[in-house]
Image (tube, rainbow, N blue to C red):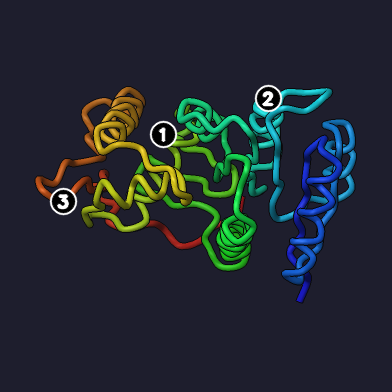
Amino acid sequence: MTKPRVLIVDDDAELSAMIVRLVEGEGWSARAALSAAQAELSLALGLPEVVLLDVMLSDANGMDLCRRWRQSHPELGILMLTARGDPIDRVLGLELGADDYLPKPFEKRELVARLRALIRRRMHTASSSPVQWQFGQLCVHLIRREVLAGSQVIPLTSIEFKLLVELARVPGEPISRQQLSETVQAGGYRPLDRTVDVQVGRLRRRLAQAMPGCDWIQTVRGEGYAFVPRDDAATPSAPTTP
């Protein structure tokens, strides 16, 4: 079995070397890039399963890299690792496409646990998940992280896409606010219930604007929210290829 690959992008050479040792101690493959330029070259040579990405690099802004890499490499796992731990920075990183966010300083065991969870999700998605789900005219493309109404792309933020995937995974079944919150970020930071309500509301509006007259998400009193397929599509279609 091929070893999971982790790319550490951080201009702190000492910290990068420590993380490389930590990752290799778990039996994974690790590479370090001390600049954005080195990271771009490394990605061109072959995509890892996960990138540990620092926000403050000497030659680039990590947030900009996160957004660009998410667009060009939808299947890439991205864990932001940064000293900027304010909630607004975490939310921004997740909105730009990061899968998780861990502020410095961090516990080694927590970093390994976050990496293991992200690697597991990425490898599972690559090996067994369908490429896309089809609900009537609504298509959710899991690899491209894209949602279409017919041929029209519905512009969603990373958080909105994650919420839609979690809801559409089990059509008709209510998902609690806590579970949706954990979907937004798998780590210790949790948005307030009201924040989840706002995010789901935005997702609802974007879907309604693209397909007027269709309410795809229903509020289930006391339980959370449920995705309700339309156009007589009760479940996701069989796996398809791009």
- The mark found on residue 112 in the picture is none
Q: CA distance from mark 1 to mark 2?
A: 28 Å
- Bin the neighbour count of mark 1 within 10 Å (Cα to Cα): few under 14, some 14-19, many 20 and up: some
The answer to whether the residues at label 1 and label 3 have Cβ atoms under 8 Å apart is no
Give the mark, 1 or 2, whose residue is nearer the N terminus.
2
Residue tagged by mark 2?
64
The location of residue 60, given as percent across then percent down, is 78, 23
The location of residue 74, given as percent across then percent down, is 63, 43
Residue tagged by mark 3?
223
The location of residue 180, given as percent across then percent down, is 33, 47
Give the amino acid type for the residue marked by disc 3 in the picture: Glu
At x 76%, y 77%, the residue is 1
Give the mark, 1 or 3, whose residue is nearer the N terminus.
1
SS at mark 3 in the image:
loop
The answer to whether the residues at label 1 and label 2 have Cβ atoms under 8 Å apart is no
- Horizontally, residue 76 falls left or right of residue 184, namely right
- Horizontally, residue 155 falls left or right of residue 60, namely left
